[in-house]
Image: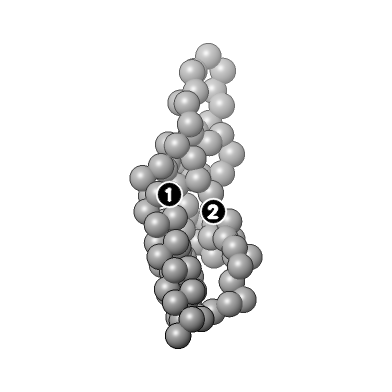
């Protein structure tokens, strides 16, 4: 299990895509020890502060900064393709 966020992305939520690209390459090449990933993701990218009297943005984190919906779907498609490639290697 690999955490794309925090130390692996140098605490920059946007760098999670770099980590996803690297891990996807390893999975596609046949690495079987990678069995899952964790990513910081929400509907709206980034994070927001809780400010009294200020309305919150729906779908945006108030804790850790997150990838938004579009980057999340690209990341999941990338990972799914890597898993499919790894499965083909196992059948070859």
The residue sitting at the front extreme is 91
Left or right of residue 92, residue 70 in this image:
left
| Residue 51 in view | yes
**Closer-to-camera residue (38/55):** 38
43 over 28 or under it: above or below: above
> Residue at image x 46%, y 26%?
57
Badge 2 local density, few (<14 within 10 Å), some, or many (20+)?
some
Determine the secondary structure under disc 2: loop
**Closer-to-camera residue (70/77):** 77
Displayed quadrant of residue 20: bottom left
Q: Which residue is mark 2?
A: 39
10 over 91 or under it: above or below: above
> Residue at image x 45%, y 37%?
43
> Residue at image x 49%, y 74%?
87
Q: Which residue is mark 1?
A: 72
Q: Quadrant of the C terminus?
A: bottom left
The x and y percentages for residue 25 are 43, 74
Asked if the residue under mark 1 is in contact with the one under mark 2, i.e. CB atoms within 8 Å, the reply is: yes
The x and y percentages for residue 29 are 45, 80
């Amino acid at each position: 299990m690999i955490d794309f966020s925090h130390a692996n992305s140098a605490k920059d939520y946007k760098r999670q895509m770099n980590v996803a690209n690297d891990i996807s390459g390893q999975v596609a090449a046949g690495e079987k020890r990678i069995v899952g990933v964790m990513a910081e993701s929400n509907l709206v990218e980034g994070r927001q502060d809780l400010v009294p009297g200020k309305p919150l943005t729906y779908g945006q984190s108030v804790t850790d900064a997150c990838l938004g919906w579009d980057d999340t779907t690209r990341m999941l498609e990338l990972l799914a393709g890597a898993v499919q490639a790894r499965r083909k290697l196992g059948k070859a």
